[in-house]
Image (cartoon, rainbow, N blue to C red):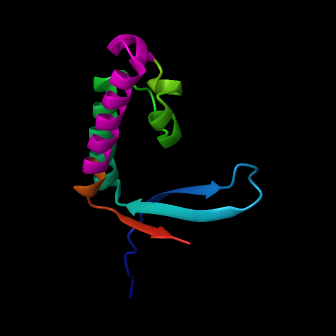
């Protein structure tokens, strides 16, 4: 008798203190290929709306790295931060309305 075992792709990340001496959290997300393609399409599409090449939470919060150009585009740090906050909210919405599983150690 043969059983089919589904394959789930997963992505992992960790958090640590500033000196990277202690890991405080390891988390991951798993989904089928079909669901990852849907999530990725929506995620990348949203980032492209504002010319963001990749998402990093700390860069979003600081309006730095891939978010830095928003300062010039929108005329001030406060205006750029507002746009960055909207991008993060939109990305959270994408995740909350998508099919995937998460875990944390």
Quadrant in the picture for residue 83: top left
Q: What type of secondary structure mainly makes up the magenta span? A: helix
Left or right of 94 in this view: 1: right
Query: Is 10 located above or below residue 4 in the figure?
Result: above
Quadrant for the C terminus, please.
bottom right
Give how far across and how far down residue 71 sits, in percent.
42, 17
Q: Nearer the viewer, residue 38 or 73?
A: 73
Quadrant in the picture for residue 70: top left
Give how far across and how far down residue 60 sits, in percent.
45, 35
Q: Which residues are magenta?
A: 69-93
In this view, which residue lies farthest toward the left? 97
What residue is rendered at 26% in x and 48% in y? 94
Give how far across and how far down residue 61 sits, in percent.
46, 37
Left or right of 56 in this view: 45: left
Give how far across and how far down residue 21 sits, in percent.
77, 58
Q: Nearer the viewer, residue 96 or 34?
A: 96
Residue 60 in view in this figure: yes
Quadrant for the N terminus, please.
bottom left
What residue is rendered at 38% in x and 29% in y? 81
Residue 66 belongs to magenta span:
no
């Amino acid at each position: 008798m043969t059983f089919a075992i589904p394959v789930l792709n997963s992505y992992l990340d960790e958090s640590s203190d500033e000196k990277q001496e202690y890991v405080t959290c390891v988390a991951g997300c798993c989904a089928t290929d079909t669901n990852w393609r849907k999530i990725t399409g929506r995620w990348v599409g949203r980032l492209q709306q504002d010319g963001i090449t990749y998402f990093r939470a700390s860069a979003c919060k600081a309006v730095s790295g891939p978010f830095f150009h928003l300062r010039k585009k929108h005329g001030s740090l406060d205006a750029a931060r507002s746009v960055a906050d909207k991008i993060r909210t939109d990305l959270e919405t994408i995740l909350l309305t998508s099919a995937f599983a998460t875990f944390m150690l």
